[in-house]
Amino acid sequence: MGGSAGNSAGATGSSGAAGTSTAGLGGGAGTIGGGGGATPPDPNAAGLMPLRHLSQAEYLNTVADLLGDTSLTADALPEDIAADPDTMPYPQPDIVGTLAATQYHDAAQKLAANVLTKLTTFLPCNANGDATCAQQWLTSFLPKAYRRPVTAAETGELLDLYKTSRVAPLSLSINDAFSLVLRAILQSPGFLYHWEMDPTAPAQAGPIIQLDSYAIANRLSYFVTGSMPDAQLFAAAASGGLSTPDAVAAQVQRLLASPRAHPTVESFFDNWLGLDLAQSQPKDPTVYPAYQSDNVKAAVEAEAHGFVDNIVLAGSGAFADLFTSTQSLTNQYLAPLYAAGGGGGTTPSGATMRPVTLNPAQRSGILTSIAFLAATGGADKTVPPRRGKAMYTHVLCQTLGMLPNVIPMPVQTMGTTRQIFEAHDQLGCAAGCHTLIEPFGYTFEHYDGIGQFRTVEHIDPQNPATTAPIDSHSTVTVDGKPQDVADAVALSHVIAQSTQAEQCFATHWMRYALGRLETPEDQASLQSAMSAFSAHNFNVRDLIVGLVTSRTFRFRTLAPGEVMQ
């Protein structure tokens, strides 16, 4: 893109006291783009584009597409980190330090060794052609590895490396020389980093730069598929066919219709709602023996992924359906968890996930799924603050104030979980945040720590026969007003129609797409994406199209101190 690739521009989101929104929508709950006389966002603005390297998933997907190699696992690569579990829960690559560089070196070494076992089919020529074959290979391979056109100097440097390795003092064999050059490519900035430069001068208007077709192709592909562009995207970039919003829209619609989009959608929901934690949250085997099986946990993950895929990619695409649909998937391992508490239905045989209609009196969309409830449930009981916080911060984009250094344990030990926490909320230290999040958490009290439905709760560990009825009624604040809800099913229906939730959802998709928090320069783009979302009855696919065709996805602003060359 013609800039100094060393300028990494991060972004920070807005912050506030407990109960304020940081959804990047320019105002409080239910507003977008400012209000009350606020200055309208600049439609020509664009946010920063941070310099970052491939994430674990992107690296693995890229070498699978580039080399046909799926031998590596995420453990072999530098760890991704989430900047803030509440506002930016989407893991991003960290700075490449000594350990990360060593891991990339070792990964390149393994991949190159695997290529050597199939060198005759990997090369477009006879390896015995030596330098002539090396040049032919670099000419065809390097643009794919760097995901853009390469310069003669870049090809020449690698060809010189090949030639030098073949003579004294190294005197490598032809195979080892090819391996050396491949290792160099796989550890180069051109392969590891998202900074795909077109050889032509970038279009610039003041501090705003239009991303060239190769940068758009890569940004689009890695967002939607988590991997390098396919042949059609490369062809579109080569022809300059990604310079208009309509052209970009056509490509994203094509990619969303392909199986390659499924992992991206699944990853978004895993991180946004913490669904992936359903696999790792510890559960007491004496309290929840049914959740100790790997088969059950695999089914929980498969159901959550299948549910969002079926709505977002294969079905209606409707935001509301994510929170109201009772159409899901189950198998012989998962069905008993949904049948608990009188859920009804037959238990299918086998591990294959099969369509099922869940009890609408007990279940309503993703928030009443086993995955969400197990991820936010405790080890041996429910934890209303945990479930409430997920709703408050992730679904409604609200922020909490600073937590006190010491939070005392609940003083009441007998009674229902709700009664214990309600007593705890009377403590002064708890009033600041628990009274904000726990009203949401109480609506989920009909579900135990692994998401099984229940109508009563055992309240005396010394006398299991002692029970009390569940009270899930609560008053929650959504769209800036208090709303009485009977339970989590009712809450899910409120969320399905909530302007605040729709805007928060759009904001999270922008954060996921850009790999950073939104800034004031992104506001017009977020507003335009939200308009596309609204205009198409809040279809998630149209929201994604709106995001990738927005100004801030197709343009960028110069980073502080960046000088164009």
Image (cartoon, rainbow, N blue to C red):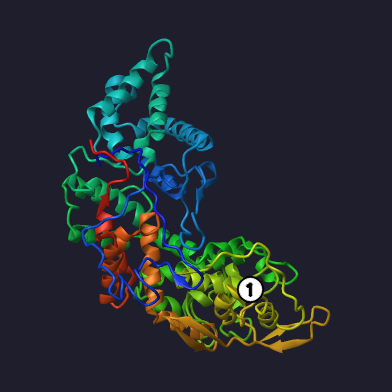
Query: Which of the 4 image quadrants contains residue 171?
Result: top left
Residue 26 position within the rendered picture, expressed as x and y whole percent measured from the top left: 34, 68
Q: Is residue 321 visible?
A: yes
Outermost residue, right side: 462
Outermost residue, top side: 168
Q: What residue lies at 49% left-to-right and 54% top-to-bottom?
A: 83
Query: Which of the 4 image quadrants contains residue 527?
Result: bottom left
Quadrant holding the N terminus: top left
Q: What residue lies at 37% left-to-right and 36% top-to-bottom?
A: 189
- Between 84 and 429, which is closer to the camera in this rendering? 429
Q: What residue lies at 56% left-to-right and 81% top-to-bottom?
A: 439
Residue 459 position within the rendered picture, expressed as x and y whole percent measured from the top left: 75, 82
Q: Is residue 7 left or right of residue 385?
A: left
Residue 518 position within the rendered picture, expressed as x and y whole percent measured from the top left: 36, 59
Q: What residue lies at 43% left-to-right and 23% top-to-bottom?
A: 176
Query: In this figure, what is the number of numbered marks?
Result: 1
- Between 78 and 129, which is closer to the camera in this rendering? 78
**Residue picked out by circle 1:** 430
Quadrant holding the C terminus: top left
At label 1, the amino acid type is Ala
Instruction: Classify mark 1: helix, strand or loop.
Output: helix
Query: Which of the 4 image quadrants contains residue 331?
Result: bottom right
Please determine whether, in this image, residue 422 is positioned above or below residue 278: below
Residue 341 position within the rendered picture, expressed as x and y whole percent measured from the top left: 63, 84
